[in-house]
Image (cartoon, coloured by chain):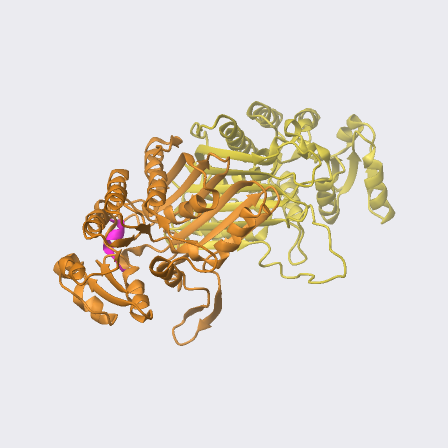
Chain colours: A yellow, B orange
Amino acid sequence: MPPLHIGLLGAGGIARAHLPGWLELGARVSVHTQDGSADKLAGEYAELGHDVTAVPDLDDLLAGCRAVDICTPTPTHKDLALAAIAAGRHVVCEKPLALTVPDAEEIAAAAAEAGVQLHPAHVVRYFPAYAAMRDAVVRGELGDLAVLRFTRGGARPQWAPWFGDPAKSGGVIMDLMVHDIDIARWVAGDVVRVHARTRGSERATGAPADVVTATAVLTHASGAISHVTGLWGLPDQRFRTTFRVAGADGLLCHDSLAVPGFRITAQGVRAANEGIPSSPMTESPYLTELREFATSWEDPAARPRVDAHDGTAAVRIACAAVESSRTGQAVELPPASRPAAPERGTAATTHATDPEEPTR
Amino acid sequence: MKVAVLSFAHVHAAAYLRLLRDMPGVEVVGSDPEGAAAAAPGETRGRAFADQHGVPYVDTYEEAFARGPDAVVVCSENARHRPLVELAAAHRVDVLCEKPLATTVADGEAMVAACRAAGVRLAVAFPVRFSPAYAAVKRAVAAGDAGRVLTVSGANNGHLPTRARRWFADPELAGGGALMDHTVHIADLLDDLFAARAVEVYAQTNNLLYADEVAAETAGLVTVEYDNGTVATIDCSWSHPRSHPAWGGLEMTLVGEHATLEMDAFDQKVHGHSERHARPLELSFGADLDSRMLRAFLFGPGPDGMDLADGEGGLRTLRIVEAGYESARRGTAVAVAGG
């Protein structure tokens, strides 16, 4: 069998997080960008002996690859995804899938129509602490969930200016909080009501004090409630995520800064804040994610833990949060066409037979 | 200085009795006629409770007032604060009332009016104001080091308090559940911190914790918008497991334009594990907030100037709770009544 051939679109921070994962999976990777940065990325890896080449023409890339990995700014997702789907390629697409619900649904519908896989890259589902928590919830360890809290924050992204333009990134809710919106839904089920507020400077001005933060309360169909916050903070705001999940039979808490496994406590100079989180302790969650996606292309029975419906649902909830933040009103969401979370009893059975098998 | 503790209904009565008993220059007496007449099964009340804590006891509130107290501490059930505060006002004695001030804004307003008319001091028991961690937050905000505060995320989680005192989850006596019990501490801190008015509240609650045991809401998230632009969300849930060695805690993160601040009023503990008791061991070494609060009430503010919430402050936090219940019923944000 020829090696897996991946068409990587984009050469920014997240492309650099995905690329080592693809190489680990034995893929050869063609990189395409609009701004010439593909040459630099491909060159760096080719120099190390990896099979990574820059491809100047998108159609050439689509003609040759098995799947496309879209790691570009959010507003470009739709056109690139539709082009890849039209070429019959599976699509891995960075979160959020799109900035609007119709766009996200159009991408998902096109993929379904064409019979290709669409994988929204909600990578937090692959971070081991989150996966362990969700497994425990599915096993019924915590009983019925009642109240959940999620926080995610770090220094304002400076490596690419489009994050600071809400017209392009969708702002701190669409780009950052969407991670925990997806996790809250994954863990506690569909969301029926959202109330959110955004404070600070959504548009980056370049001033040092350029903080933007959002807070949202999600009401799940089960009656459980989630508090979710996102922060693009000051330059020295260390990247940190936390959760606290409380159910009738127990409590699970996590603080990413409290349990790094390894830390540098001095190095003579003050280190810059990392952009993309990484850990020396466990396999890269990006690799875990990409492996699960790629496996499903060979084995139709292997269904990744996140699918196109999850991606559109996250966009729908995030858009409702943005709307609530703008109008000041709580936003009601229509009942989902397909439930987000399994019944606990059945899920526990599924889990017992195969911990890797998604539980729906 | 003579102090009377009126009613032992509240779980804090035990700590107040012990602290007042041991406070130099203070002579304390307790009275708990309702508790003596009808203690809930398994709960020690009345004279036996006072004996347990080594504090003199009188059978009626009138006897307690006959001793000429300089101040009284009201520890009755939330819905029974009003008559005791009014009794204190009638005897022209300063009063420290457990939180929340009352279960309805109407009761709270009557209490404030009675104390004002009698010229007595009405203070509300919000001990977390006396946390050194909160004092540090207040200094950073007051000095402008934090810049404009954009958002606050607060959590005041505790275990279901009904094992010690059953009435906490009785909507008649408590006025509600977790939303009534645990919104007000953080709301009071922010009332003190910002001197801003709460204008809108959005609250969602459920009773998925202890659903078979209590009728009141046991979990809640309360979002409060202030007229200075700050948005605060408070997790008021009784979501701390009952078998945990700690009762719960109070944490707050403030995101300002120039600094992000975090405080935990109860995290100063040595952690370990007891083989003898087969469970985690926690040794608190933080400041005793109840003691600092009682001293400020009886002898005036300490060096950091922190004073107790007054009746008006207690009313402002109660209005937030009242709006919260209405919001939870309606599923929409609700304006906070002016006062």
Considering only vertical position in the picture, is A42 above or below B247? above
One can see residue A288 in this view: yes
Task: Name which quarter of the figure residue B288 lies in.
Answer: bottom left
Q: Which residue occupies the foreground of this view, A203 or A117?
A: A203
**What residue is at 73 percent from the left and 36 percent from the top?**
A160
**What residue is at 78 percent from the left and 27 percent from the top?**
A58
* Quarter placement of the N terminus of chain A: top right
Considering only vertical position in the picture, is B79 above or below B265? above
Reply yes or no: does residue A61 show up in magenta.
Answer: no
Please state the horizontal and vertical placement of residue A321, each as a whole percent of the image: 51, 32
Please, which residue is most extreme toward the bottom here?
B276
**What residue is at 62 percent from the left and 25 percent from the top?**
A114
Please state the horizontal and vertical placement of residue A177, each as a whole percent of the image: 56, 39
Please state the horizontal and vertical placement of residue A103, each as a whole percent of the image: 60, 24
Residue A137 lies left or right of residue A66; in this view the side is left
Residue A340 lies left or right of residue B37; in this view the side is right
Residue B103 lies left or right of residue A53; in this view the side is left
One can see residue B43 in this view: no
Residue A24 lies left or right of residue B40; in this view the side is right
Considering only vertical position in the picture, is B207 above or below A164? below
The range drawn in magenta is B164-170
